[in-house]
Amino acid sequence: DAGVIQSPRHEVTEMGQEVTLRCKPISGHNSLFWYRQTMMRGLELLIYFNNNVPIDDSGMPEDRFSAKMPNASFSTLKIQPSEPRDSAVYFCASTRLASRNTIYFGEGSWLTVV
Amino acid sequence: SQQGEEDPQALSIQEGENATMNCSYKTSINNLQWYRQNSGRGLVHLILIRSNEREKHSGRLRVTLDTSKKSSSLLITASRAADTASYFCATDKGGSSNTGKLIFGQGTTLQVKP
């Protein structure tokens, strides 16, 4: 069974550009999470969806960040405009709500904004 | 702020020794989990302990939970060089509703020298 698939794996972009990160959760999972990891702040929960509905977006740092989940098999995290301080590894993770919250992570999208 | 905090932040041991990492959290929980992250990779679930359990084993891993002190420990016995990684504890929020939301600590970086 395929794991959580994220794309792109690496992206370098210039400040002010739009960045779109993509995630395909594990088939059958109905919860999806976006995390950001940096050396300074560790692993932060940005937003999560249950059954494609955003439940808690209190971790989204600013209005420049937005996330969507148009269907059960796809989600995007968008940053517009991007800034150098957005440089981080962005992880998508998914789970079944009934599985006592064991979540499965993708390999991450490594974003560098210059 | 992050729910869990691990200590030590970094740990270096010789192969064959035991490694102990601790995690403290702030609010009531339904369960506590430990994850492992190899350099440049996503997090991988290791073990889950429920709030009504005090100890759990899985192979060379032993997890304890003390809800009165709001703390947990992860013991890796007979460590191997391949155990070199960062280890994170993660907690959900206690209560009857399972939202699936997990908050991660800052992590302990373990180095096992061959």
Image: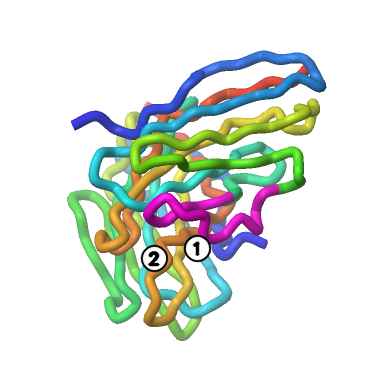
Q: Circle 1 sits on which residue? A: B23
A101, above or below A60, in the image: below
* Residue B105 appears in the picture as rendered: yes
Q: Is residue A7 left or right of residue A51?
A: right
Q: Position of residue B14 (x, y in %)?
A: 40, 36
- Kind of residue at badge 2: Leu
Indicate the amino acid at tag 1. Cys
- Is A56 within the magenta? yes
Q: Nearer the viewer, mark 2 or mark 1?
A: 2
Dots 2 and 1: beta carbons under 8 Å?
yes
What is the quadrant of the N terminus of chain A in the image? Answer: top left
Within 10 Å of disc 1 (Cα), the crowding (few <14, some 14-19, many 20+) is many
Q: Is residue B104 left or right of residue B47?
A: right
- Magenta residues, start to end: A47-60
Query: Residue B31 location in percent, x, y?
Result: 36, 70
Horizontal side of residue B111 vs A28, given as left or right = right
Camera-nearest residue between A8 and A28: A28
Residue at which label 2 appears: B32
Report the number of discs: 2
